Image (spheres, helix red, strand yellow):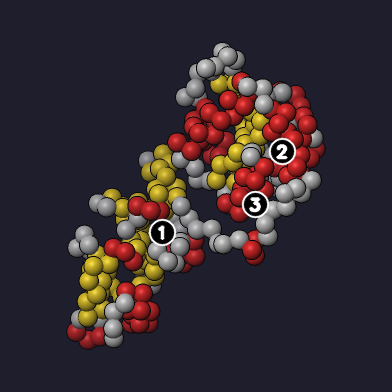
Amino acid sequence: MTTGKRLRVLIVDDELLGRERVASLLREHPDVDVVGMAGDGNAAVDAIRDLHPDVVFLDYEMPGRNGLDVVREIGAEHMPVTIFITAHDEHALSAFEVSALDYLVKPFDDERFEQTLKRARRVVELNQVDRLREQLLSVLQGQPSPQRSSDRPPQYLERIAVETKGKIRVVPVAQIDYILASDVYAELYVGDRRYIVRESLNSLEQKLDPKVFMRIHRSAIVRLELVDLFLKGEGGDYEVQLKNGTRLRVSRTRREALEQRLGVSG
């Protein structure tokens, strides 16, 4: 049940596309007013003091003052409901989740954003902002202490943002069958669909869970559970055939490791 109060929102992100992404999602809500946008920490401090928003979407990583620096400058006791935005799970999981503050990890999908906005709205309507401020203050004071990065398991990509025809589509990694190199780009194959991202295969390989994906050739990464056949051709060439019939080359230097992963005897 809502109180009829309009939600005043401030967006802080050093990337224009990031600000516009949040703003476009907020425009779908007629009872939400975007009262301002800021592109750096100093502007964020001024906007929070001048505009008194109910909610602020606050980028963690910005040149100069980052998100936590903004909170320190304003003072946790004077902050609106704060939703951190970060490109790295490690920041969110170590500092924000434990404090019951919400966060968005780029690239986030529409459903995740809606859940976050709904939670923020409920906090404002139920007048629970003071409780969240206390939790935010505990983060700034180091209680509970964030886990050191060396103690945390590595975080792997869960989503990949793909720009097509001026729109950004979020492709869940769990739906990707295989990835091929294409010059400076990579081609993501999801069923019968192909998406192109401006990222090298080397870069993607480092971000994908090695228990799920494997680089089988300098130009190919495959989801291991989809491998149906391991084919040995003439002249020492090898291929894998996926369950959908797609065949991909296997380099000689990666053959032995692939055989071990698949449980294939040499």
Residue wearing tag 3: 94
Distance CA(mark 2)–CA(mark 1):
43 Å
Distance CA(mark 1)–CA(mark 3):
32 Å
Q: Work out whether 260 lies above or below 132.
A: below
Q: Residue 188, how many percent across, how many down?
A: 35, 56
- Verify CB contact (< 8 Å) between mark 3 and mark 2: no
Task: Name the element at disc 1.
Answer: strand
Residue wearing tag 2: 135
Asked whether 18 or 215 is in front, the reply is 215
Given the image, on which type of amino acid does mark 2 rest?
Gln
Residue at coordinates 54% horizontally, 16% vertically from top-left?
2
Task: Name the element at disc 2.
Answer: helix
Side of 173 where 263 appears, left or right = left
Find residue 185 and name its label.
1
Residue at coordinates 46% horizontally, 58% vertically from top-left?
199
Residue 183 visible:
no
Distance CA(mark 3)–CA(mark 2):
14 Å
Q: Which of the two discs, 2 and 1, labels the residue nearer the N terminus?
A: 2
Q: Which of the two discs, 3 and 2, labels the residue nearer the N terminus?
A: 3
Given the image, on which type of amino acid does mark 1 rest?
Tyr
Given the image, on which type of amino acid does mark 3 rest?
Ser
Residue 224 visible:
yes
Side of 198 where 100 appears, left or right = right
Q: Work out whether 173 lies above or below 19.
A: below
Nearer mark to the viewer, of 1 and 3: 3
